[in-house]
Image (tube, rainbow, N blue to C red):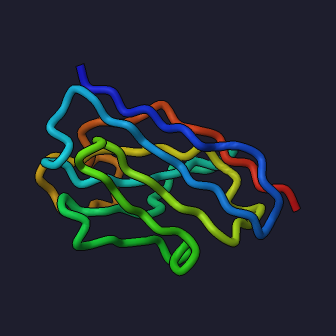
Amino acid sequence: QVQLVETGGGLVQAGGSLRLSCAASGLTFSYYAMGWFRQAPGKEREFVGGINLNSLNTYYADSVKGRFTASRDNAKNTVYLQMNSLKPEDTAIYYCAARLWGRIGVQENEYNYWGQGTQVTVSS
C-alpha cells in the first residue's frame, strides 16, 4: 500500500520560511519523479515544483521560482520543499505526488500517487 505523508505545514508571517516534507512508503521511491502541488480556497489545484528521480533536474512554477526549492533524499524515501520569502498568496494546502519513471509533470493526471496534504497559512 503506497502512502505519501506530508508534514511541516503551519502558520507563518509573510517573509518567513517553512520546509515541507513528504515521506513515501510502499513504493520504490527512486523510481518516481516527485511533484508538489497546492490548492488555495476556491481555486483549482496547481503545480508548484518538482524534482526528477536522481535530483539532477528541478522545475518550478513562475510564481515560486527563486523562492521555493525541491530536494529529495532517496535513502530516506523523502522529498522536501523549502519555501522562503513566503507571501500571503502562498496560503494553500500543499500536496506531494509521485510519478513513476516519468519526468517532472505539471499536470495532476501525470502522477500516480498523492498525499493527503498539509496546510500552509501565510499571514500579512
Q: Quadrant of residue 77?
A: top left
Identified at 59% across, 63% down, the residue is: 83
Looking at the image, residue 57 lies above or below residue 8: below
Identified at 26% across, 73% down, the residue is: 57
Left or right: 124, with 35 as reference point: right
Quadrant in which the N terminus appears: top left
Task: Give the x, y percent position of residue 87.
Answer: 74, 66
Looking at the image, residue 54 lies above or below residue 95: below
Looking at the image, residue 3 lies above or below residue 36: above
- Residue lying at the far top of the rendered structure: 1
Task: Give the x, y percent position of residue 7.
Answer: 54, 38
Q: Quadrant of residue 50?
A: bottom left
Left or right: 12, with 81 as reference point: right
Quadrant in which the C terminus appears: bottom right
Identified at 38% across, 37% down, the residue is: 23
Identified at 77% across, 55% down, the residue is: 122
Task: Give the x, y percent position of residue 22.
Answer: 42, 42
